[in-house]
Each structure stands twice: as C-alpha cells, then as structure tokens.
Amino acid sequence: MAVAVIAAMTQELAPFLDEQVDTQAQVPPRVDATVHFYPRVHQGFPLVIVKSGLGKVNAAIAAQTAIDRFAVKAVIQVGLAGAVDTRLKQGDIVLGERYLEHDVDLTQVGLRPGTSVFDAAIQADRIIIPEAMQLTEFPCDPMLMQLAEDACRTFDLGAVSLPVLGRRPAIHKGTIVSGDQFVSDSKKSAWLRSTFGATATDMESAATAHVCHVNRVPFLAIRAISDQADHSAAVDVAAYLPIAAHNYHDVTLEIVRGWSEKRGETSDRGA
C-alpha cells in the first residue's frame, strides 16, 4: 500500500525525483487535473510522489486524487514554510502536530477564526451551525509523528546545513497554519502567532490535512523553514531550498520505511 509524498513545487521534490528507484517496478508518470503523479518503488516500498501546485485548492485536488486513484494509505506533505514562532531559524524542521486554515473567517456568525463548517442552516435572519458540524483544527497521525521524531534523531541533518547555515537545524513540533497567500509581513505573522499559536505558515498543509481527515487517511506535514514570514521572505527562499529539501527527503523516506514495516508491509528486497 503506497504512501503519497506531496509538495507544491517541482523544486521541493527534487531529491525524490532525482534519486535512483527500482526500475523493474517503475510506473510511468501521469497528470490528472494539472497534478503530476510519479508512482515508484523505493527500496521495496511503494511511493507516489505528487507535485500539486501552489495553494489550498491544488493541494486538496492532489490529496483526494492520490487517495482515490492510487489508494494511498498515508500522506506526507513536504516543502518550505515561513517561521511564525520567532525562535525558528532558516533550515529548521517543523513537524506539524495540528493544522488550521488561517484564511477561513466565519467570525461574523460567532465562530473562531479558522473554523471549517460541514453544514449550516438559515433560519430567519440567523445562520445556525451545529457544533458537530464545526472543526477548528486537523490533527496529525500519532504514528507518523513518532516515526518522524525517530527519523530526525537517526539522521545527521547537519551534514549539508553546517557549511551554509553554520549550525545544525533544530527540530520543532507545533501548529502549521495555511492560507492562499505568501506571508511576508511581520504584522500578519504576529497575528497568526497570537490568534492560532502558529509555529509556521504555508499554503497547502491544512488543506491536505482536511482532505486526509475526512477520508480517515493518516497525515503528517514536514516543513523546512526557508524564511521568517516577514519583509525578508521574498529574498530568502532560494538560498535555503536545496538544504531544506535534502533534510526532509531523508526524514520522509525513513518514515515511509518505518510506517510500512510497522504495518507488516515489508520491503520486497531480496524476494
């Protein structure tokens, strides 16, 4: 049973697409609804590498298509993110414990910012939204999180980081908030921090988490910090992308190996 690895941009997936794979089990790439899918087998474990495109809608299309057409049993989102927590620095890794859509705003009807609504009723001059139809956040999968923490301890994530950053990346767990905007304003970043307790922000993770939640598919996002989500954001991203991609690539493949083995889906190597 395959695991999907989703990112918004081809560059974010470069280490996955460039590596050698088991050619005998290779399946040709395909494009569905502008989303690129690269089914492959890595060391005996089936993967579907997915380039979704930027933003929540593209991410949701990619996740649902991967679940429906490739029957993936877990989804891992990778890519870059902006730091909202001021303790984070470029190159650090964020493992998302929970995910919220920061640009969903139903505060006019009494809901907290970021609350998703699955149904509502209009009565006279009021909108009635039952509490059972509300969901404020989407959680990560506990097993995937544990595997990610183990993988981060296993690998020397400083190997490529030290020459450029001068330090090893720190690993953080926290809340990732997503919206259809590239956050490059310190005031916006402060609002995300105070309103949601956000650790990092991106444009896709919460949407993918939303899709996985309603499909009951395990999900985890692994984001590498490329910028501070402030006025410097536009000039920082390119310099840190190769380092970020290398680090989350190694962690992700270790998660896939561990997840498959824990579920009894052993590698085909040596078969």
Image (cartoon, rainbow, N blue to C red):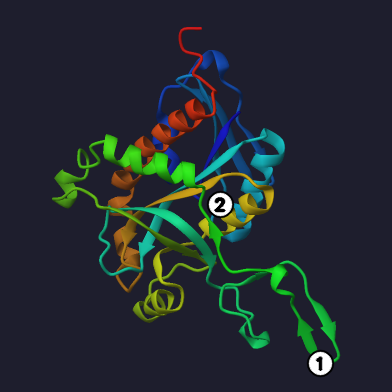
Question: In this picture, is 11 found above or below 81?
Answer: above
Q: List the single residue furthest toward the right.
A: 124
Q: Earlier in the sequence, mark 2 or mark 1?
A: 2
Mark 2 is on which residue type? Gly
Residue 186: image location, x then y, percent: 34, 78
Q: Residue at x 39, y 74 (%)?
A: 193
Q: Residue at point 39% right, 42% down? A: 148
Q: Is residue 204 visible?
A: no
Q: Is residue 65 left or right of residue 260?
A: right
Kindly identify the residue that appears in the image at 44 percent across and 55 percent down. 96
**Front residue of this view, candidates 117 and 83:** 117
Is the residue 92 above or below the residue 115 in the image?
above
> To which quarter of the image does residue 101 belong?
bottom right
Number of residues whose C-alpha sits closer than 10 Å to that of mark 2, classed few (under 14), some (14–19) or many (20 or more): many
Classify 116 as above or below 28: below
Can I make out residue 85 in this image?
Answer: yes
* SS category of the residue bearing label 2: loop
Q: Quadrant of residue 255?
A: top left
Residue 89 position (above or below residue 63): below
Q: Nearer the viewer, mark 2 or mark 1?
A: 1
Q: Secondary structure at mark 1?
A: loop
| Residue 125 numbered tag | 1
Mark 2–mark 1 Cα distance, whole angstroms, equals 39 Å
Left or right side of 265 for 183: left
Q: Position of residue 140 (x, y in %)?
A: 51, 52
> Residue 53 — which label?
2
x then y, percent, for residue 2: 58, 31
The amino acid type found where label 1 is placed reads: Asp
Say which of 257 and 227 sits in front: 257
